[in-house]
Image: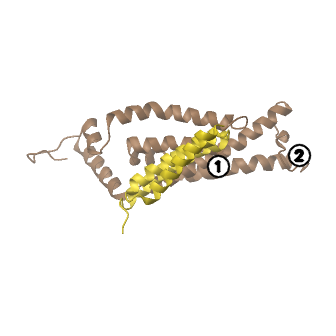
Chain colours: A brown, B yellow
Amino acid sequence: MTKADGTGTYQLTAEERRVAAGRDLIIEVIASLMIPLIQLFALYVIIHGALGAGGGFQGGVILASSFILYVIAFGITGARKRLPESWNTGLQSLGVYIYAGVGLVCILVSLGFVQYLNYWALPLPVAYEMRRAMGMDFVEIGIGITVMATMTSLFFDLAWKEKEERKEVKESNEGGEKK
Amino acid sequence: MIVPLDLLMLFVIVVIAIATISAKDLFSAVILFGAYSFLMAVVWAEMHSIDVSFTEAAVGAGVSTAFLIAAVSRTARWEKG
């Protein structure tokens, strides 16, 4: 950015950059406090889903809402850098593979003995009841990963504005070459 | 389950739903839709259907409101005609 008298340039401070991007210090601090708690609660909902209210879908949605809060508080450019679209695509597929893989492994190991809910056949060195519980948790984790990646990707696509992104990139480039 | 409380909340839900579809400002329509979803979640919880209530609160009041606000920010704020 050029100075007012047109001589030379100066680097924007963090506060000036925040004001220029239309962000707010209070929102940033509160969001940085809230996001870890939201993500912890989402993991609790996913793991606790087999026993009580909740499950993979609700936990995945809550996990995605923490990324949405990050986008609202810190801007979408940084969020896209931290969670690129290629990661979203990979995580969507990974969740489906976990979900289908647990069932397929169970069918293969039990030789199709019980076609429905045969999590006991998981090849893990733990007790029978533990294997059933862990199979259910693996399925919930797969659902949660897929739902989180899908919801985050949907919000990124909806909130993405190419004009703003170009402006921010240009400003950061200018700040970089000033030194 | 308290029937008068249910009837009162369902009446408020109907009022909010009518306000949502008749609002000219699409932003306030989105916020009213979030209020509708949240009250609906309260009604589900009050009817001892915790799982449905949880899903309604997470998806209806949380994420879909954010999606619709993002959609409004990409299009026009005021309804035409």
Q: Residue B29, position in %: x, y?
A: 43, 54
Q: Residues within 10 Å of mark 1 (few under 14, many from 20)?
A: some
The amino acid pointed to by label 1 is: Leu
Query: Label 1 is found on which chain of the structure?
Result: A
Q: Residue at x 26, y 44 (%)?
A: A20
Locate the N terminus of chain B by quadrant.
top right
Answer above or below: position of A29 versus A113: above
Q: Residue at x 55, y 41 (%)?
A: A63
Q: Residue A163, position in %: x, y?
A: 33, 58
Residue A154 placement, left or right of A106: left
For the residue pair B54 and A165, the one nearer the viewer reads as B54
Kindly identify which residue carries mark 2.
A110
Q: Quadrant of residue B26?
A: bottom left
Locate the C terminus of chain B by quadrant.
bottom left
Residue A39 placement, left or right of A170: right
Per the model, the C-alpha gap separating discs 2 and 1 is: 24 Å
Task: Answer yes or no: is residue A125 visible.
Answer: no
For the residue pair B40 and B9, the one nearer the viewer reads as B9
For the residue pair B48 and A40, the one nearer the viewer reads as B48
**Tag of residue A94:** 1
The amino acid pointed to by label 2 is: Ser
Q: Residue A99, position in %: x, y?
A: 71, 48
Query: Label 2 is found on which chain of the structure?
Result: A
Precedes in sequence: disc 2 or disc 1? 1
Q: Residue at x 84, y 30 (%)?
A: A127
